[in-house]
Image (spheres, rainbow, N blue to C red):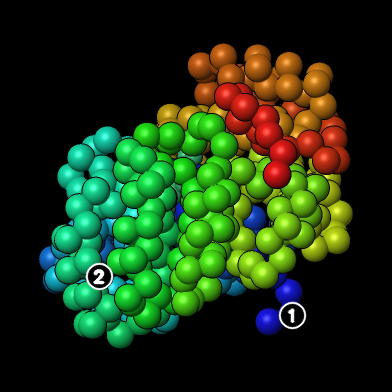
């Protein structure tokens, strides 16, 4: 492989099929889009709502890897089988979701606290799933020193790729990624390891990818929500233009209007859109977006958002950073 692979992280409620298609058409630069998790079901049934996100006809042109959230091997195997029938050759297992409703049921990051059950689950799915299986993991539930035992479990299986977001569940998204834990995974695992966490600018990617020059797989989430041209920039291309951002906004707004049929949720989704994009815009734009966030009336919101899209100024080199802490690799 001559070039590092860059992946769009799964972001539940944000990076669905509408988002991916718009991103791929306007900005590109991403090798694979890992789709937000879907729950597994007995008999492998996929709901109509999930099909709108996952079915290949809604993901034209994008290379997508579906992600499953499950602690029931039988359901995982059946759902993976359904995905295979749609043409997918890789499925990703979510071992990182920190939300209490998920983790308290022993799924996502919660599964990391049930090591024997996790081992049995992995043995079953790797034995009976006729697809590549990649894992996306945090480094523990409550403490980073859980990671050694977790890695012992993973290394026994033919994992296609281990994506490591080096935080424990209790961190959610705050604090610094634990690079020592990541180094442990990369040194010990016999399969490819992908780094994920807090890459918000092309400069940060440059530093971290130089430091870990043997890592070929990189996943970016919030950095791409804030700067959709980030992967293009990493690959030497231009930063986002105002015209592209306007196209991005209007495409998504129009498609969500059709899918959600004028639902108020469109305003919510577009507020989230501008919340992230504001990080790469000028100070004046950010003040305008502050006003936008407080608008409740749909018509007023869309009028103001259209104005911002038509007039905003992108500041090259800016990117998302956590309000908790700004750090450099
Ligand atoms: C709003 C939101 C939704 C997320 N949804 C998922 C998900 O569905 N599956 C998953 O594995 N991770 C999910 N994550 C975690 C991200 O994929 C990623 O691991 C995390 O944001 C760290 O990467 P980043 O610093 O590049 O954003 C989500 C994160 C956020 C903030």
Q: Position of residue 201 (x, y in %)?
A: 74, 45
Identify whether 31 is placed above or below 238.
below
**Which numbered marker is on residue 217?**
none
Disc 2, SS: helix
Eyeballing the image, is 104 above or below 212? above
- Residue at (70% x, 44% y) in the render: 329
Q: Which residue is mark 2?
A: 122
Is residue 126 visible from the viewing direction of this image? yes
Residue 225 horizontal side relative to residue 204, left or right: left
CA distance for labels 2 and 1: 31 Å
Residue 168: % across, % down: 40, 42
Badge count: 2
Q: In the rendered image, which quarter contains the N terminus?
A: bottom right
Whether residue 58 is visible: no
Q: Quadrant of residue 290?
A: top right
The residue positioned 37% from the left and 72% from the top of the image is: 155
Compare marks 2 and 1 and give the one earlier in the sequence: 1
Residue at point 66%, 40% (across, down): 226
Q: Please name whichever residue, 75 or 262, is drawn nearer the observer in this view of the structure.
A: 75
Seen at 32% across and 76% down, the residue is 156
Q: Is residue 301 above or below residue 160?
A: above
Using the image as rendered, state which of residue 53 and residue 84 is in the foreground: 84
Residue 186 at x, y = what percent?
54, 65
Q: Position of residue 158 (x, y in %)?
A: 37, 80
Q: Residues within 10 Å of mark 1 (few under 14, many from 20)?
A: few
Q: Quadrant of residue 280?
A: top right
The secondary structure type at the circle numbered 1 is: loop
* Pick the front one: 26 or 186: 186
Q: Which residue is mark 1?
A: 2
Position of 141 relative to 302 (above/below): below
Q: Is mark 2 within 8 Å of ligand 1?
A: no
């Amino acid at each position: 492989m001559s070039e590092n692979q860059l992946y769009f992280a799964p972001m539940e409620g944000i990076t669905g099929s509408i988002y991916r298609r718009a991103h791929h058409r306007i900005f590109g630069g991403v090798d694979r889009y890992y789709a937000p998790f879907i729950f597994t079901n007995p008999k492998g049934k996929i709901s109509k709502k999930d099909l709108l996100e996952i079915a290949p006809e809604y993901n034209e042109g994008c290379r997508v890897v579906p992600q499953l959230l499950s602690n029931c091997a039988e359901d995982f195997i059946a759902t993976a089988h359904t995905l295979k029938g749609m043409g997918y050759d890789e499925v990703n297992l979510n071992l990182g979701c920190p939300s209490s409703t998920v983790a308290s049921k022993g799924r996502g990051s919660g599964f990391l606290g049930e090591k024997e059950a996790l081992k049995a689950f992995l043995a079953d799915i790797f034995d009976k799933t006729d697809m590549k299986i990649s894992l996306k993991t945090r480094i523990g539930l409550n403490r980073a020193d859980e990671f050694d035992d977790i890695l012992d479990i993973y290394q026994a299986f033919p994992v296609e790729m281990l994506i490591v977001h080096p935080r424990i569940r209790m961190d959610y998204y705050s604090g610094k990624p634990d690079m020592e834990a990541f180094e442990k995974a990369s040194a010990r695992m016999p399969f490819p390891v992908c780094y994920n966490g807090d890459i918000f600018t092309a400069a940060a990617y440059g530093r971290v990818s130089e430091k870990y020059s043997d890592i070929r797989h990189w996943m970016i989430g919030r950095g791409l929500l804030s700067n959709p041209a980030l992967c293009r920039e990493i690959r030497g291309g231009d930063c986002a233009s105002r015209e592209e951002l306007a196209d991005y906004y209007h495409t998504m707004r129009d498609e969500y209007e059709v899918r959600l049929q004028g639902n108020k949720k469109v305003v919510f989704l577009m507020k989230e859109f501008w919340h992230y994009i504001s990080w790469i815009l000028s100070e004046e734009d950010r003040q305008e977006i502050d006003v936008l966030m407080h608008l409740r009336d749909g018509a007023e919101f869309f009028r103001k958002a259209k104005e911002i899209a038509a007039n905003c100024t992108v500041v090259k080199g800016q990117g998302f950073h956590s309000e908790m802490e700004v750090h450099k690799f």
